Amino acid sequence: MNMMSEAAVEKALDQKMNDASYKMIGKDVSVYYGEKRALFDVNLNVRENTVTALIGPSGCGKSTFLRCLNRMNDTIENCRVTGRITLDTDDIYDQNIDVVELRARVGMVFQKPNPFPKSIYENISYGPRIHGLARNKADMDQIVEASLQRAGLWTEVKDRLHESGTGLSGGQQQRLCIARAVAVSPEVILMDEPCSALDPIATAKVEELIHELRANYTIVIVTHSMQQAARVSQRTAMFHLGQLVEENDTDKMFTNPDDQRTQDYIMGRFG
Amino acid sequence: MTDVVSPVSGIPKTKSGRRDIGIKRRYAAERRFRTYGIAALSFGIIFLMVLLWSVVSKGYTAFQQTMITIPVEFSEQIIDPQNERATNPQKLLTANYPVVARNSLAKALGVSVDDRTKIRAVGQLLSDGVRTQLRDMVVANPAIIGTTQNVALLAAGDIDSAFKGQINLSVAEENRKVSDLQVTWMNQLAETGVLAKHFNTGIFVNGASSRPEAAGVGVALIGSFYMMMIVLVLSLPIGVAASIYLEEFAPKNKFTDLIEVNINNLAAVPSIVYGLLGLAVFVNFMGLPRSASLVGGLVLTLMTLPTIIIATRAALKAVPPSIRAAALGLGASKMQTIFHHVLPLAMPGILTGTIIGLAHALGETAPLLLIGMVAFVANYPTTPLDPSTALPVQIYMWANEAERAFVERTSGAIIILLLFLIVMNVGAILLRRRFERRW
C-alpha cells in the first residue's frame, strides 16, 4: 500500500490542480432575467480537483453564475443565458447536451438542507435509481453506504437508514444532501451557501467534508463567509454588481488582492 | 396622577412620561373581537343543533315500520279458484292477494268476512304493498298455496302514522284518515304484540312508491352510487392532469391566464346552469337517455372539475420549491420530479379537494332535476343508462308528497344523506392524515 502522508496528498492535489486543464470554462457568460441583466460577460474557469469559492455581496450574481453551471437557471421563467460554458470539452448549452445527463455530472447542494421527505436510504438511492447506476439491490446498498461514508454520515445513520431523512438535525440533513449529490458520481459539485442554515459545529463538519471531497470532485461553492472561503477554497472569485471583479488563488486574494474592491469587501468596507 | 398634555401633539402623556398610545383601548378592542368571535361561533353551533335536532327528531321514526304479524291463510279459493296455475303462470301474478291478507286479518280480529263495511275498514289497516309481498312469496314457492304461514304484513301508512302518534286522534272522526274503529283494532292488535314496530329495511332497499310505507331510497342510493363512481372516474384524472399541466408545464401567458380566470369563474357558476348545459349537450345533442345516472354523472363531473382543479393546483403550489430543486438538481426530468416527488406530497390536498367535491356533487339536486332525474323509478337501475333518481332528488320528491308518513321519510332520507356526507368527510380527514408528510 502506498501510504501518502496528508501533506503529500495535499501537495499532489495542488500539483494536479495547477497542471490540470480547466474542468469547466465559462466564457462571456451573461444572464438576463427578463429585461434585467444579472451577469455581465463573466469569464471564469473552474480547475479540476479544486475548491473554487465565489464571494461577493448579496445580489452580485454569484449564485446566478453557479446555477448556470448545471443549467438550474433553465427552471426559472424568463431566464436567458448567453455566452459559452464548457464541461471538459462539451458545451453545456449545446442543443445536443441533455440537461438530465448534465445534472448527473454536475451535482448541486442547496442553501437550505432539502432532503426528500422519505427515508435516508431512499434519499440517497433516488439519484442512482433514475440514472440506472445500480444493477441490483446489493449494488444499491453499496452505493448508499459509500455515499454516506463519503459524506461522513454513515456511522451516525447506519442503524436508521429507513427512518425519515427529515428527522435528522440540520447539519446531518445537509450532509445527507451532499451524500445524495455524491451518490450519482458527479464530476463537479456545486454548493450554494451550504452552511448558511447551519450552526458552527455543523458548519465545521461540512467544511471538513468539502476538504475531503476535493480529492475526488471539483467543487464550486458560493459563500457569504470570508472565513469559510479562506478555509475551504484554493481559488476564489469575487463578484460585484453582476461582474467578476477578480479571480485568484485564495491565499493571494485574502492577503494581497489585485483589485481595490476585493480589498474593500474582504476588509468589510462594503457588502 | 394627572395626565400631562404634551404641548406639541396634544396627546395626553402617562405617568411614565411616554405618550398614551391607547393600550387600554387596544386591549378592549381585542376583548371585543374575541367576544364577537365567540358569539359568531355560538350562533353557528346553535343553528347546527337546531337543524340536526329538527331532522333527527322528525326522521328517526322513519327507520321503524309498523308491521302486523298474523297467520296468513293462502287460500286456494281466492288465489287460484279454477286451479289453472300449472297451465297459466300469469294467474299467480294477478291473483287477489290483498283479499287473502284482509281475510286473514279479519279472522285475527274476529270480524265476519260478510260484514262488508267492517271488512273494508279491516282492509284499510293493511298497506297495498301486501299485494307484492304475498305475490312474491307465492311465486317463489307455489307450494304454500293452501297452507297457513306467519307473515309480517306492512301496515297502511296512516295506521303507521297513527301508531307512531303522528296523527292527532282528538280531531273529529270524519276529519281524520283513521276511524275510531280502526284505532280500537290497532290498539287491540298492539296489546297482543301482533301489531308492532320493526326495523324498517324497506326504506333502504325499496324503490319509489306512492304508498309511503312501501317507499324507499333503494333506487336513489344506486343512482347516487353510479353517479359518484362516474364523477370520481372522470373528474379525478381529468382534474389532476389539467392542474398538473397548468401548474407545472403550461407557459404563463395571456391565454393560460384566461383559462385560469375561467376555471375560477366556473367554480362559482350556479349548478342549475350545468343542468341546462347537460340537458342541451348530453340529452338533446348527444342523445343520451333522460333520467340516466350516466348523464347525471357527466353533469356533476363538469360541476366538480373546477373544484378539483382549484384544490389540486393549491396543493401543488404548496409543495416547497426546494423539493423540486433537489430532484432537478439530481438530474431528474420534469416528469420524474413531478410524479416522484411533487405529486405524492400534494396527494393529501388533492384527495381532500376531491372528496369535498364529491360530497358537494352527492348533495346536488338542481342540475339533476333538469336532466329528468325527478322520476318515479320503482325498479333498480341495472346500468347507469337506466332511469334512476338520486338521494337529494328523492328527498325533494318526498318533500312534495301529501301523506303524513312521507314527512318522516323525507327527514329519514336526509339523515341517510347526511350520514353519507359525514362518512365521506371522515374519509377525507383519514386520507389526509394517512398521506401527510412533513418536510
Image (cartoon, grey):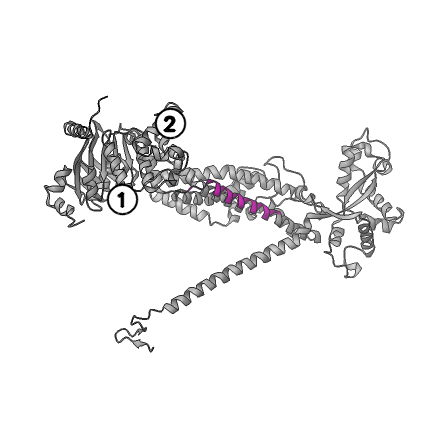
Query: With respect to residue B37, does B290 lie above or below?
Result: above
- The outermost residue toward the top is A1
Q: Chain of mark 1?
A: A
Asked whether B314 falls inside the magenta stretch, the response is: no
Spatial CA distance of label 1 from label 2 is 32 Å
Say which quadrant the N terminus of chain A sits in: top left
> Viewer-proximal residue, A90 or A197?
A197
Circles 1 and 2, Cβ within 8 Å, touching? The answer is no
Residue hosting label 1: A200
Read off the magenta span.
B416-439
Image location of residue B336, percent across then percent down: 37, 33
Q: Secondary structure at mark 1?
A: helix
Identified at 74% across, 59% down, the residue is: B168
Q: Is residue B68 left or right of residue A17?
A: right
Q: Position of residue A255 (x, y in %)?
A: 12, 42
- The structure residue drawn at horizontal position 37% and vertical position 28%, both measured from the top left corner, is A129
Q: Nearer the viewer, residue B175 or B6?
A: B6
Looking at the rendered structure, the secondary structure element under dot 2 is helix
Residue ranking furthest to the bottom: B2
